[in-house]
Image (tube, rainbow, N blue to C red):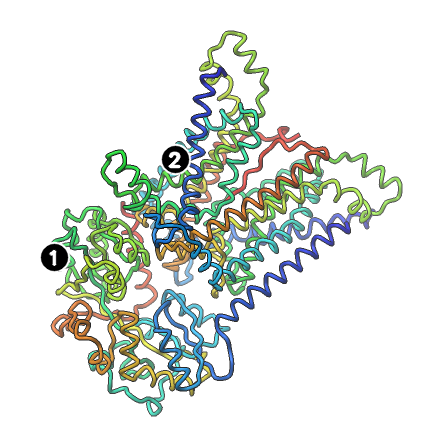
């Protein structure tokens, strides 16, 4: 009996040690003091050098925690127990968080440099008058192809994805709204349609795409496309720019008939505490030189027009990531749908994935 | 006497509590949830959708077919393995070699196959060495089935091996003394006598093969949706717990069916 | 079996063993490669191990994983052993059978069902997902295997031993600590180790019930494997392989020790995933 008690105590002590060790390791990755800002951001979505620069200028230390989907971020903040000062939801999620009273309005009197943002990125339907959000980056959904397998210029429309020559060759981003979205656009419908007939038609059309689909995955598309595992992929512009930096044979097209345009935005969640630091950071990021540096590092498109002017000409004039106004006009932004409709999109999309 | 009873009760309490909280309650909850839609309204629509839309039935049929193929391939490879190992001198040592890979995390093994099967991975390099053109192997049905079988093989070998070591050598000697050929000994004596091992192997392999969602994702590229993938999708992505639970109930029913088919009378074997 | 057949047989098993170990060694070999992919071996380096040990997040997850494994195995061993004693004390055959079949439900259920049903359960209880939900789930699915490892030992114990002790005036506590526990100790140790294996191997259940940034190695490998090949994971595989070897070694040392002290273990227990 004694032996058992000793063993149990030993294991418990060991566990306490492990718990302490892991706690210390986690703590050391972000130290806390009074002059801090807690930023809850997507993974690898800000230039670390900017954080150092910000601390040097203002004295605020930025703790960054990361999430990998809007839904995960939403759930975590909703669950409570967090103290994030800023977070970066996409368009429809801003709308949802706003509707669920999870955001604090911006105090415009404390903001500077708002005039730097291009008018086409402000006052969007998900946040009229930008009462809660400042655009951070924007991008599109499009087609990436490898010019070793696909003749340049021969793949410019969603409908062409259905051509038999791409059999087993297309990798799709695993995202219900995006995949249902391009199917809807190819049918000439809105990406925010709530008509069941349209959604069923989109699902049926996707089912016919099945033979061409190689995989429906997420982050791994970057690696597989960069290594030439598949000739074609449907993915977001930011992901495309990363792949293209690894493999010069890759090209990105936004189909001219239209696509999705998305925005990631800085917002203040209800959990915020360090307001001085928040406005210092927002104003810091509004500055063209900082926004430009961030865009250079991340490779996504910046909505800050003054920053855009500071970027090299090759980036500025790159139609793949800064499409001409004619294309911009055709892009559609997702709006927040009712839970029933979200469910319908998700279910139909899953049915497409199950279709063999 | 009364004191002794309460002492005994002390042992029952935590265990019964565990049974109630983590066995009975969760199963009951999954059945309960299968009758609710996303608005928390009582409904039979989940079952209706499952049985009326061809998609779910086809998916279920495919999932069963995949699990069946995985199980058959594992038996075909494992049976001779178990047979040979049970005849070896240091068989305990060899069987240890079978167990060892099961201690390596499943996800690490799946990850290894991403490297092995990719376009310029080892398998394609070998193919090219033998003059076979490079193949597209990741995200195909065949690679999903083979990787799943790879992961299941040790779990198939072990029960078959156990049942083989139960066969007394005298049976086999008697059989050959009576003039049976080796083939006859195998089909008439060894295979029937190891049937319980094969059955428990099927039990251990078939049921998890219905639900290997991480493999259908990493190796199958989500082109293969098994019952398990559908449950995972509904619970963690689409958040339609009602439909997920419905598929879960189907999975539980198929589990019971498999158990009934492969149930071996264990009584007396442990003594 | 004549020689020719056994030669063929030996060739066969060596071939299958090569296939079984190839992916594992493939991973480990590339953990020493200077390159960034598992396609070409570009010369020897230990830098991926360096990266791994400098990766504080990974180290914290590693410690958390072991913490969960040890703690859950400890509790499941205690509860499972109590359960085994309870089942053993159940004299009515029918009741015993019922308890045993209830016990085996979690052993045969597919992981996704366990994960999904626990997720519903924790949500219904409003228990936040994270460390505690993972710990509770691991305890829950480890209990049945511990029971199955301890029960045969208990059944082997002769009742006359206990009767004799009772006749000599021993209390229930004394019988438990002086007779029962020492006798079933090998079963308890085996159960504890099986529980650790189950915990370290689990992916699906943890994947369902974790949240709030808490992860175990399996879940972390899954999310990293989805981001592509990183030889840091290969280095992790190397470390885990050594770790498994050590665990297997300890387990078999204890087993063999028990073997020499009486009981023959002729059944190889099957670890689950």
**In front: label 1 or label 2:** 1
| Residue at (44, 83) in percent of width and height | A60
Binning the other alpha carbons within 10 Å of mark 2 as few (below 14), some (14 to 19) or many (20 upward) gives: some
Q: Is residue A96 left or right of residue A119?
A: right
Q: Residue at x 30, y 48 (%)?
A: B223
Quarter of the image for residue A267 reads bottom left
- Horizontal side of residue B131 vs B154, given as left or right: left
Residue B106, how many percent across, how many down?
A: 45, 46
Residue B217 in view: no
Spot the residue most to the right.
C168
- Asked if residue A63 is positioned above or below residue B3 in the image, the reply reads below
Task: Please give left or right for residue B214 compared with residue B169 in the image.
Answer: left
Viewer-proximal residue among A310 and A135: A310
Q: Nearer the viewer, residue B170 or C49?
A: C49
Q: Residue at x 23, y 54 (%)?
A: A203
For residue A99, the mark is: none
| C-alpha distance separating marks 1 and 2 | 44 Å
Q: Secondary structure at mark 2?
A: helix
- Identified at 56% across, 68% down, the residue is A24
Residue highlighted by disc 2: B68
Alpha-carbon neighbours of circle 1 within 10 Å: few (<14), some, or many (≥20)?
A: few
As drawn, B60 above or below A353: above
Mark 1 belongs to which subunit?
Answer: A
Residue under label 1: A152
Q: Position of residue C137 (x, y in %)?
A: 55, 54
Q: Chain of mark 2?
A: B
Question: x and y percent of residue A95 in the render?
Answer: 32, 75
Describe the element under mark 1 as helix, strand or loop.
Answer: loop
């Amino acid at each position: 009996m004694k032996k058992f008690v000793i063993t149990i105590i030993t294991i418990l002590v060991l566990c306490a040690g492990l718990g302490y060790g892991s706690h210390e390791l986690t703590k050391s990755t972000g130290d806390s003091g009074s002059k801090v800002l807690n930023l809850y951001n997507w993974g690898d979505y800000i230039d670390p050098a900017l954080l150092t620069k910000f601390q040097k200028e203002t004295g605020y230390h930025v703790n960054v925690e990361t999430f990998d989907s809007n839904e995960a971020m939403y759930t975590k903040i909703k669950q409570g127990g967090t103290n994030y000062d800023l977070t970066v939801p996409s368009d429809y999620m801003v709308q949802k968080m706003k509707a669920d009273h999870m955001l604090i309005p911006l105090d415009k009197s404390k903001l500077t440099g708002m005039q730097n943002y291009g008018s086409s990125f402000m006052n969007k339907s998900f946040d009229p008058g930008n009462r809660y959000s400042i655009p951070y980056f924007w991008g599109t959904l499009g087609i990436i192809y490898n010019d070793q397998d696909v003749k340049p210029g021969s793949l410019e429309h969603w409908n062409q994805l259905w051509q038999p020559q791409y059999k087993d060759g297309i990798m799709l981003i695993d995202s219900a709204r995006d995949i249902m979205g391009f199917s809807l656009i190819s049918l000439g419908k809105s990406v925010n349609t709530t008509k069941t007939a349209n959604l069923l038609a989109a699902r049926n059309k996707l089912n016919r795409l099945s033979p061409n689909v190689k995989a429906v995955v997420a982050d791994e598309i970057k690696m597989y496309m960069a290594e030439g595992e598949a000739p074609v992929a449907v993915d977001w512009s930011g992901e495309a720019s990363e792949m293209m930096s690894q493999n010069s044979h890759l090209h990105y097209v936004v189909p001219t008939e239209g696509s999705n345009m998305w925005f990631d935005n800085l917002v203040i969640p209800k959990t915020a505490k360090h307001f001085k630091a928040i406005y210092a950071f927002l104003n810091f990021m509004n500055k063209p030189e900082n926004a430009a540096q961030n865009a250079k590092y991340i490779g996504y498109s910046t909505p800050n027009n003054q920053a855009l002017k500071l970027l090299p000409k090759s980036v500025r004039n790159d139609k793949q990531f800064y499409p001409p106004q004619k294309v911009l006009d055709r892009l559609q932004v997702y709006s927040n749908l009712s839970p029933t409709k979200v469910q319908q999109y998700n279910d139909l999309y899953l049915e497409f994935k199950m279709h063999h | 006497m009364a004191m002794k009873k309460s002492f005994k009760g002390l042992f029952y309490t935590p265990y019964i509590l565990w049974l109630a909280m983590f066995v009975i309650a969760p199963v009951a909850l999954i059945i309960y949830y299968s009758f609710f839609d996303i608005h928390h309204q009582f409904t039979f629509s989940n079952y209706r959708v499952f049985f009326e839309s061809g998609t779910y039935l086809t998916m279920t049929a495919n999932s069963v077919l995949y699990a069946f193929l995985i199980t058959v391939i594992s038996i075909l490879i494992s049976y001779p393995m178990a047979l040979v190992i049970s005849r070896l001198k240091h068989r305990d040592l060899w069987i240890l070699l079978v167990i060892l890979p099961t201690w390596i995390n499943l996800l690490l093994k799946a990850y290894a196959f991403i490297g092995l099967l990719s376009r310029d991975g080892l398998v394609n390099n070998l193919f090219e060495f033998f003059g076979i053109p490079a193949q597209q192997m990741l995200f195909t049905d065949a690679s999903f089935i083979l990787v799943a079988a790879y992961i299941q093989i040790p779990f198939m070998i072990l029960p078959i091996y156990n049942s083989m070591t139960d066969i007394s050598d005298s049976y086999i000697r008697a059989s050959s003394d009576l003039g049976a050929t080796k083939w006859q000994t195998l089909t008439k004596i060894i295979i029937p006598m190891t049937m319980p091992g094969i059955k428990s192997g099927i039990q251990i392999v078939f049921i998890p093969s219905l639900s290997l969602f991480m493999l259908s994702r990493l190796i199958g590229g989500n082109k293969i949706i098994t019952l398990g993938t559908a449950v995972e999708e509904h619970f963690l992505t689409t958040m339609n717990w009602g439909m997920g639970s419905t598929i879960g109930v189907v999975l539980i029913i198929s589990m019971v069916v498999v158990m009934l088919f492969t149930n071996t009378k264990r009584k007396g074997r442990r003594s | 079996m004549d020689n020719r057949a056994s030669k063929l047989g030996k060739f066969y098993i060596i071939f299958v063993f090569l296939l079984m170990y190839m992916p594992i060694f493939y991973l480990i070999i590339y953990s020493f490669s200077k390159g960034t992919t598992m396609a070409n071996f570009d010369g020897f380096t230990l830098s991926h191990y360096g990266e791994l040990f400098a990766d504080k997040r990974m180290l914290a997850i590693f410690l958390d994983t072991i913490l969960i494994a040890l703690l859950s195995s400890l509790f499941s061993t205690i509860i499972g052993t109590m359960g085994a004693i309870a089942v053993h004390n159940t004299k009515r055959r029918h009741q015993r059978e019922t308890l045993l079949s209830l016990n085996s439900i979690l052993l045969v259920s597919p992981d996704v069902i366990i994960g999904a049903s626990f997720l519903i359960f924790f949500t219904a209880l409003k228990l936040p997902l994270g460390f505690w939900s993972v710990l509770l789930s691991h305890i829950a699915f480890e209990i049945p295997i511990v029971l199955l490892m301890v029960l045969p030992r208990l059944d082997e114990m002769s009742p006359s031993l206990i009767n004799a002790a009772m006749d000599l005036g021993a209390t229930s506590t004394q019988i438990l600590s002086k007779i029962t526990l020492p006798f079933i100790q090998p079963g308890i140790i085996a159960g504890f180790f099986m529980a650790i294996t189950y915990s370290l191997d689990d992916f699906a259940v943890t994947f369902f019930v974790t949240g709030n940034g808490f992860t175990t190695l399996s879940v972390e490998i899954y999310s990293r494997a989805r981001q592509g090949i990183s030889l840091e994971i290969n280095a992790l595989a190397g470390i885990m392989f050594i770790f498994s070897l050590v665990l297997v070694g300890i387990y078999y040392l204890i087993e063999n020790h028990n073997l020499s002290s009486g009981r023959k273990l002729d059944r190889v227990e099957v670890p689950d995933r």
